[in-house]
Amino acid sequence: GGESFSGISEDKTQASQGSSDYWIVKTDAGGVKQWDARFGGSESDGLNSLQQTTDGGYVLGGFSSSGISGDKTQASQGNADYWIVKNDADATTETMFDPEDFFSEVYPNPVQNQLMISMAIPASEVTIRVYDLQGKMISLPTTIQNTQAQINTTALPDGFYILQITNNKTGISEVRKFVKQE
């Protein structure tokens, strides 16, 4: 992955949307190009990282200075915003989303008995894991209803913990820290 400042040339199959765009190229094991894809709006967009997801697609992360234009479906919130793009394995269908649409909030923090997770997607579509600071996974009773999850933290000793929430469809995770304090 990287940035593209050019129009269509050589092996690039899509013209630029703005001054710079996200551009990714998929190759086979022998280095032969399978496809390329461009994502961008009317201004400067810069790709910083990409990761293959469990569905064979890719999630791309970077910045965008573009408003609603080209592939960008959300208004700019200022100078340069974080921009996340998710595409399918063949790059023909892409989904753009705002990280704020993924998980909403974790509360209360510090927690005594019940940790609440309020999400923008159904809680049944995620896997929730709690880890101690040594990385050991801790099994805790969890209740799921609609877009809410409630974790019973009564049995946890006071201390710091890591909460990992993974979208089962995309493989994308959000990691949060919380404190158990009586």
Image (tube, rainbow, N blue to C red):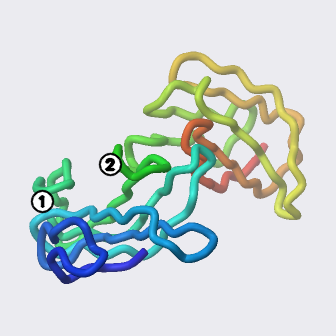
Q: Quadrant of residue 84?
A: bottom left
Q: Which quarter shows the C terminus?
A: top right
Q: Horizontal placement of 163 versus 85: left or right?
A: right
Mark 1, residue position = 67
Instruction: Tell me whether the residue at label 2 lies in contact with that at label 1, contact meaning CB atoms closer than 8 angstroms.
Output: no
Residue in view at x 58 percent, y 35 percent: 117
Image position, residue 73 (x, y; %): 19, 48
Q: Is residue 155 above or below residue 162?
A: above
Residue at point 77%, 29% (across, down): 152
Query: Who's the residue at 15% across and 53% down the image?
Result: 75
- In terms of depth relative to the viewer, which is nearer, 19 or 7? 7
Residue 177 relative to residue 69: left or right: right
As shown in the figure, which amino acid type bears the numbered disc 1? Gly
Residue 5: image tag: none
| Residue 131 on image: x %, y % | 81, 52
Q: Amino acid at mark 2?
A: Met
Q: Nearer the viewer, residue 166 or 2?
A: 2
Question: Marks 2 and 1, how far apart in space?
Answer: 13 Å
- Residue 111: image x %, image y %? 68, 42
Q: Position of residue 155 (x, y in %)?
A: 89, 35
Q: How many marks?
A: 2
Q: Nearer the viewer, residue 41 or 116?
A: 41
Mark 2 burial class by Cα count in 10 Å: few <14, some 14-19, many 20+: some
Q: Secondary structure at mark 1?
A: loop
Residue 96 bears which disc, if any? Answer: 2
Number of residues whose C-alpha sits closer than 10 Å to that of mark 1, classed few (under 14), some (14–19) or many (20 or more): some
Q: Earlier in the sequence, mark 2 or mark 1?
A: 1
Q: Is residue 114 left or right of residue 57?
A: right
Which one is in front, 164 or 18? 18
Helix, strand, or loop for circle 2? strand
> Where is 50 relative to 179, above or below?
below
Quarter-wise, where is residue 38 in the image?
A: bottom left
